[in-house]
Image (cartoon, rainbow, N blue to C red):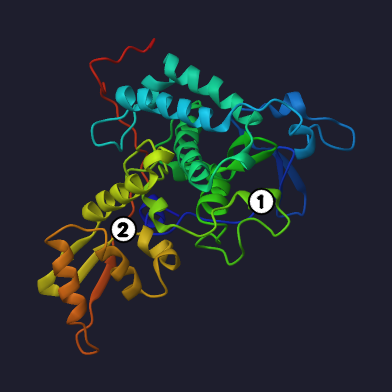
Amino acid sequence: MSRSNRSNSARPFYRIKVVNGMYSTTSSDGTENIHLLNVLNWSQLKNLTLTEGTTIKDENELKTKNFYNTVQFSIELQQKMLNLKSMFIDPSGRLINYYQLRTSNIYKDLCEMAKHLTTINLDNVTENERKTLFINLYNILTIHGIVSLTDVPKSVLDLNQFWKTTSYKIGAHFYSLDDIEHGILRGNKPHSNCTQRHFTFNDPRAKYSMRRCDPRIHFTLNRGSRSSPQIAIYSSTNIEKALNMATTSYCNSQVDIIPENREIRLSKLFLWYRNDFGRSETDVLRWITKYIDEPKQSLLKTLMDRQSSKDNLHISYKIYDWMLNHYDSLISNRVNINN
């Protein structure tokens, strides 16, 4: 499928089963092929065994260890991300200079810091702290996954199973980008192209899922594309305000109202994840009215009030630009590739 066609569809989704950092696929002739997850803070080759069993410690064993303080880790991660943003993300907050970042000490520090994720304990943090941590981890994991590639792609869609295999080991378990987005942040809801919940009922990671799906998280996640929302750094102390700001910013820029045609143009995110916003397109529009500024808010409310069976609103969806959110120019006068 060409990129122009792919940009009009949600990214493909199908389940993979992960065991000890490995997943399997079946070829057309029925042969099972074993692959390694791209776990960026843990080496499979150092931890794999050829005998039965697993080298990964179970949760009870891990609980006897001295954990890296999860809240402190989250705060330190926020500071590292602020440094990264000031030097390698453009003023719009959407584009990243991946090449400069790759050769910087900031990137080296983030790689080292990610190793501490294997010793944090998610049991002793509040839901807001967990939400904040996983939003920031999703964004830094996306960046980490792209920077770690030998060749930076033109589009994240050119990367085979990027969201399913790009992972961190957090505590005792592996979390891919899809696991974080759908299993944790969306409250273990199905992917838009799937009918089953992301985590099965006996998956130990399911206990860390949000109790409900907060649709605002869609406007915080950097998917490595040019249509992704701004990259921000989130703190549990003001997470509600920050989520509202991120949502309002994205909706104001991505919701277009053409009153003379009774047309409303929306980001594809509202199509792919419609059930997160409501049961119908009307529900989605009502939800949007809370997060757009004047005069758009009044225009949308007026069009909805005048809606009738003879003169329905026309809702269309913009093409989602999956081209990589890479930026070639020097981001900041303070940039030094050795900093």
Q: Earlier in the sequence, mark 1 or mark 2?
A: 1
In the rendering, at what x and y percent does residue 54 appear?
Answer: 82, 36
Tell me the distance, in whole angstroms, between the alpha carbons under discs 1 and 2.
Answer: 28 Å
Circle 2: element type: loop
Q: Farthest residue toward the top? A: 338
Q: Amino acid at mark 1?
A: Ile
Dots 1, 2 in contact, CB < 8 A: no
In the rendering, at what x and y percent does residue 16 appear?
Answer: 66, 51
Q: Residues within 10 Å of mark 1 (few under 14, many from 20)?
A: few
Q: In front here: 270 or 170?
A: 170
Q: Residue at x 64, y 53 (%)?
A: 206
- Residue on which the image places disc 2: 267
Left or right: 235 as drawn, with respect to 38: left
Visible residue check, residue 228: no
Q: Amino acid at mark 2?
A: Ser
Q: Residues within 10 Å of mark 2 (few under 14, many from 20)?
A: some
In the rendering, at what x and y percent does residue 240 appear?
Answer: 37, 48
Is 121 located above or below residue 43 in the figure?
A: below
User: Which numbered disc covers residue 16?
Assistant: 1
Circle 1: element type: loop
Q: Farthest residue toward the right? A: 51
